[in-house]
Image (cartoon, rainbow, N blue to C red):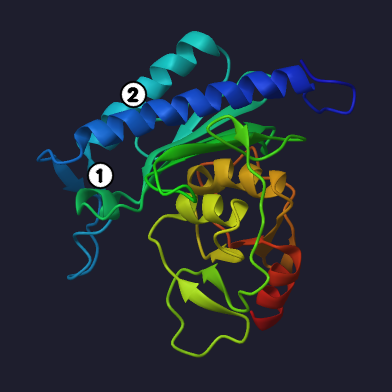
Amino acid sequence: MTDRAGFLPQESLEALERAAAELAALAGAEISGALGATLAVRYKGGGPEGDIFRDPVSEVDHRTEMLIRERLARDFPGHGILGEELDDVPADEKGLVWAVDPIDGTTNFVNGFPLFAASVGVLHHGRPVAGAVWCATSHALRPGVYHAREGGRLRFESEVLELHPNPAVRRRLAGSPGLDPKPAPHWDHRKTGSAAVECAFVAAGLMQVAWFATPNVWDVAGGIVLAQASGRTVHSGGGAGWAPFQGFDPADLHGWRGPLALGEPEAVAALLAEA
C-alpha cells in the first residue's frame, strides 16, 4: 500500500479522502438531526471550584463516535482509531490511524451557538495524509464538508474550492486561543471555540492565520490536511521553538499536546515573530 519512499499512492489517498468526507458528513447529519432536542450532557471537569463544569460531552458526541468507529471497523480493519471519549484502537504495521472528533466545539453545540464541527483525519505513521471537516457554517453560508488529501486540492462538497481574497481588505482575521486586548498590527483576533472550524476557515481563506496553545491530535489532524492542500503553512512549537510541522509522534498520539500555527506563510511568519 506504500511506495518505497513510505508515501501512500494517490489511489489509496483518494479512497481515504472519500471515506473521511463520508464519515464527516455522517457526523454532520447526526449533529443536525439533534438540533433543537433536549440533550443529555455530562461534564469532564472535576478540578478546582469554578472549573467543575468544563469540557461538556453530549449524547450526540458518544453516539456519533460509535457510528464512525463501527464503519471504520467494517471498512478499514487493521487501521487504528484515536478519539477523546473511547479507548484507542491500535494500528497494524501499515501505521494508518483515524483521528476522530465527532463534535469539536461541544460547548457551542450544547448552547445552540452555531459554530461547531466534526473532524476526521487520517494519519500515516503520524503524518496527516487525508482529512475532512464538516462545519455548521461555511464560506457558502451553509453546512458542508471541507476535505482534502496529501498532494490534492482543497474541496468543499466534492468541488475544488478556488480562493480569491479581496485585495481591498487590509486587515484580515486571526484565530487565537484568547482574545488579545492589545491592538494587533496585522489582523483582528477571533475566537470561535472550535479548532477544527478555525483550521477549515484558514484553509478556505476566511481567516488568514490561526494558532492553538494545546490542541489534541483529533482536534487538528483533519484540518492540517485542509490547510496544506490550500497552500497554507503549518508550524508546531516545542522546547526548541517553532519549526515546520512534520507530523505527530506515532508512539504518543493520545498524549500529544503542543502549540500549532497554520495560515498564509507570511502571516504565520509574522505571528511567530511576535510570539
Work out whether residue 88 can be spotted: no
Picture residue at 52% right of the left edge, 28% below the top:
21
| Identity, as a three-letter code, of the amino acid under mark 1 | Val
**Can you tell which quarter of the image residue 242 is in?**
bottom right
- In the displayed image of the protein, which residue is found farthest to the bottom? 182
Identify the secondary structure beneath mark 2: helix
Q: Is residue 237 above or below residue 61?
A: below
Picture residue at 71% right of the left edge, 77% below the top:
270
Work out whether residue 112 can be spotted: yes
Q: Is residue 82 left or right of residue 15?
A: left
> Horizontal and vertical percent for residue 22?
48, 23
> Horizontal and vertical percent for residue 235?
70, 60
Q: Residues within 10 Å of mark 2 (few under 14, many from 20)?
A: some
Residue under label 2, please give it.
66
Give residue 57's mark.
1
Q: Is residue 34 above or below residue 140?
A: above
Identify the secondary structure beneath mark 1: strand
Nearer the N terminus, badge 1 or badge 2?
1
Picture residue at 50% right of the left edge, 69% below the top:
176
| Identity, as a three-letter code, of the amino acid under mark 2 | Met
Give residue 128's mark.
none
**Can you tell which quarter of the image residue 131 is in?**
top right
CA separation in Å, label 1 and label 2: 14 Å
Q: Residues within 10 Å of mark 1 (few under 14, many from 20)?
A: many
Question: Where, quadrant-wise, is the C terminus in this rendering?
Answer: bottom right
> Horizontal and vertical percent for residue 14?
68, 22
- In the displayed image of the protein, which residue is found farthest to the left? 38
